[in-house]
Amino acid sequence: EMEFTLDLPHMDGKSLFPICDSPENDDGEPEVIQWRLKERMKTVSVALVACLNIRVDPPDVIKPSPCARMECWTNPYSMSPPKALEQIGKTLESQYTKWQPRAKYKQSLDPTVEDVKKLCDSLRRTAKDERVLFHYNGRGVPRPTSNSEMWVFNKNFTQYIPLSVYDLQTWLGSPSILVFDCSNAGVLVSPQQRDEDHILLAACSAGETLPQNPSLPADVFTACLTTPHKMALRWLCQNGAPLTRMDPELADQVPGKLNDRKTVLGELNWIFTAVTDTIAWNLLPPDLFKRLFRQDLLVASIFRNFILAQRILRSLGCTPVSVPALPPSHHHPLWQAWDLAAEVCMAQLPRLLRDPRAEYVSSSFFGDQLTAFEVWLELGSPSRGKPLELPIVLQVLLSQQHRVRALQLLARFLDMGRWAVNHALSVGVFPYVLKLLQSPAQELRPALVFIWTKLLAVDPTCQQDLVREGCHDYFLRALSGPPTAGPDPLPPNQQGLCLAVLSIMVADYPEAKERCLERGLVDVLAAALASPSPHVREWGCLCAGRLWAQSDR
């Protein structure tokens, strides 16, 4: 096992923590990457526009027989057109609501240009400076034109009326995200667009026609974005290895809740999130990953699901496009791990559905990925690049079953150097390990304290977050220990690490000094300076010096 320790830097005329003093190290690598979000954002308003004109095909569409019919998993030919349109609108809203329940939703079904304008104006007033999502289903109107125009209707449904994307973006304002689910959708997405406040997603490239496979829904793109697990399982049932193919209808019967990881559906969602997050982190530049997958919860969900859409629609002859553009991800090796986890789950469904008392056998996915990460740690180095599994390790921190092992492996990774700490910060480790400081579990403490020592050594500004959240108490309590624990309740190396964290926390930060003094830091330091361990005394001296530097007390 790893010994969680940290040597005291030599005082040779340089700063005790020289990493804080220069913007780059000797290799030209930034000492601290810009891992913090400039601002968080929310998608607070969602416009759902469907131009379907059910049972009336547009003139440029020739449908085979049989062909795809389902819209939002509803067969519009099983009921009257008005009722079908209403049902599709309600279902689409409910599908989006699962990803962003607090947003304000408004539908516009078979609208006119004026209807769309009123809708956009209304939602922008509601959203103010937050993001608006605009979803367009245009399978009941002609394809968009080369002038970046989509189609809506006139009041009497006697004409198709063009609506330019430029006008639409003007009405929506910024920030916004536009989703186009129609054939030839790529003409509505300009790759030259550089405005970060406008995000665009299209179901296919210019010149492409959406698939009409009768075994799949007509709105495959929308299904991927809003019901990814159902779509992924159905596609896998039909396209998996011949020996593992199952009834696609099983995909509709997966028991459980999305947000309950102990249920079948919850575990599948957890694995899917880990897989798509990891694919994105490995393929995207850090700044783009941070903007798309860490800034806005709904945008992050949509782009995770867009990665699935890339895989499924490419297998059907279409290439989804986006602004900002995402590199191709349909052949990423992690999809094989997802397929295996999904197949193992699906194989259990007949037994679980027959007997409600039957026990679900959890997937080995996260344990397997931790093992893969452990193998990488044995062989990894900066020259070999970042580890594929790092985002999955963060997801495993949510699981009590694997948490201790995940923390120990994360600590080993951070011990590889500043580059490793920067990678961990860029993938989003900070909120996970910050929340774990609220846990009373003693078995987490050795690795957790070591991790925080490494994070603070690379980015001392984390001291402000720790003090703001009251986390200085965690380290002070660890050093104080229960009254019956004796003078050294922690091993010396653990005491040294806690003192290292406190020394960075109080450095040039008056609020931290006051908070720590109120919680008994002087008594803790007195005990440290009297410790028989030179390691503890060294860090005690350092912490005392930083506490008293420029102090009025």
Image: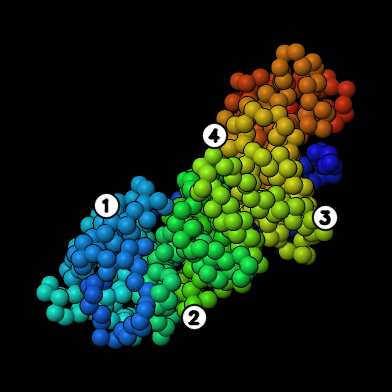
Rendered location of residue 153, percent (x, y): 19, 75
In this figure, which residue is indicated by the disc labeled 4? Answer: 468
Task: State the separation of the CA atoms marked 2 and 3.
Answer: 41 Å
277 vs 537: above or below: below
- Horizontally, residue 415 falls left or right of residue 167, namely right
Task: State the separation of the CA atoms marked 4 and 2.
Answer: 52 Å
State the SS at label 1.
helix
Residue type marked 4: Arg
9 vs 36: above or below: above
State the SS at label 2.
loop
Q: Earlier in the sequence, mark 1 or mark 4?
A: 1
Observer-side mark, 3 or 1, equals 3
Give the quadrant of residue 191.
Answer: bottom left
State the SS at label 4.
helix
Task: State the separation of the CA atoms marked 3 and 1.
Answer: 53 Å
In depth, the one of 350 and 337 nearer the eye is: 350
Mark 1 Cα shell of 10 Å, populated few (<14), some (14-19), many (≥20): some
Q: Earlier in the sequence, mark 4 or mark 3?
A: 3
Q: Residue at x 58, y 52 (%)?
A: 348
320 vs 507: above or below: below
In this figure, which residue is indicated by the disc labeled 1? Answer: 126
Observer-side mark, 4 or 3, equals 3
Rendered location of residue 419, percent (x, y): 72, 56
